[in-house]
Amino acid sequence: MSKHNENPIVDVIKVGSRKSELALIQTNYVIDCLKDLYPKKKFEIVTMNTKGDQILNISLPKIGEKALFTQELELALEQGSVDFVVHSLKDLPTTLPTGMALGAIMKREDPRDAVVMSKKMSDKTLSTLPSGSVIGTSSLRRSAQLARSLPHLEVRSIRGNLNTRLKKLDDKDGPFAAIILAIAGLKRMGWESRISELMAIPNEDVLYAVGQGALGIECRESDYKIQSILEPLADTTTTLQCVCERSFLKTLGGGCSAPVAVASSLIDGNLKITGAVWSLNGDIFIKETLATKISPQDDNEDDEPPLKCSYVEPQLYCSVAPGKINKLNLIEAEKLGKELAKKLIDKNALDVMAAARNEILQS
Ligand code: DPM
């Protein structure tokens, strides 16, 4: 990455973060990348607890709020007490609150899920675990996949940050034979060695949550200074994939906890996405795939049409600020996600999702 011109006035950029170890690792990673680009800039981390960190006795889908892990941080952004916030993209709703934007989506880590076996079952795999073994996850997406393909296993909710979950898994008297976690989080925490196997269902595509494995940096939509600072961190391929995935989820109207999954790729200008929806017990499974061509050029600066008025609201793509990424490509990615959702809706996906929502509310 090249060095950028810097404002000689030394001002401190305030960065909001949750207090969990993973959140702080991710925040520090972004700050380190920015320090490489702008060696004279100063950064200060402001940590806070979110509602999602505080409510630990209710399962996430039941709380059902979309901005559970982000609300307090977004308030701080709005009030100007922080300038940007680093999130796991999959924890961010597909539409951010008014006035907020994603200033950059960074290069994606492995987006897939992994199985972490308890020490007492370390010689087993998901398929060879004894009948009735308890698997810990509070993801409806993961539990529906398990219920559908490995019905000999019992799924039980597990909450808390990654440290807490691993402790619960390793508790000799605890109920869990294994837990399912994102590879990205395990890698960032330095726990890659705990991965026992890839969470793969035989004869099925490996699907993951929308945005999984990518970091999204949220800032004020009107703060072009911060946006230009963040811009060099954006990864074009990841951004186009994630805009497509987010557009798919947005069209389905699903929150981040719906039993919905995707897999996407962008290879040689071919953007491809698979999307799926499950019923909670996994009996119903609807899946479709679509692809489109993406043109190779990136920069927006030259292809901008002359503006008639002096100020135009900048357009966001599923709340993502375009930066230098070709806007026609972003529009195409958004359109593909929407079309994929419509294909699933034609196969009754909305009824399946509504039934899942009702079941959770009544449980
Ligand atoms: C969301 C889900 C989970 C997190 C739901 C899902 C998993 C909850 C659970 C939206 N956020 O994936 O279907 O398994 O009980 C979360 C993790 C990461 C970000 C941890 C994980 C790290 C990976 C990343 C929790 N949010 O999924 O193992 O940065 O993408």
Image (cartoon, rainbow, N blue to C red):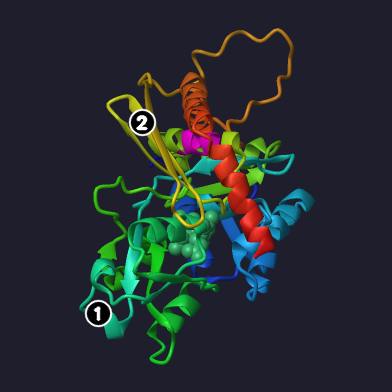
Q: Nearer the viewer, residue 81 or 63?
A: 63
47 relative to 201 in the view: left or right: right
Instruction: Say which residue appears at 37% left-offset and 51% top-offset.
Output: 111
Residue 320 in sight in this render:
no
The residue carrying mark 2 is: 272
Q: Is the C-beta separation of discs 2 and 1 under 8 Å? A: no
Residue 224 in sight in this render:
yes
Image quadrant of residue 43?
A: bottom right
Predominant secondary structure in magenta? helix
The residue carrying mark 1 is: 122
Residue 244 in magenta? yes
Indicate whether 37 appears above or below 181.
above
Tell me the kind of residue under disc 1: Ser
Reading the chain from its start, which is encountered first: label 2 or label 1? 1
What secondary structure is marked by label 2? strand
| Ligand 1 contact, mark 1 (Cβ < 8 Å) | no
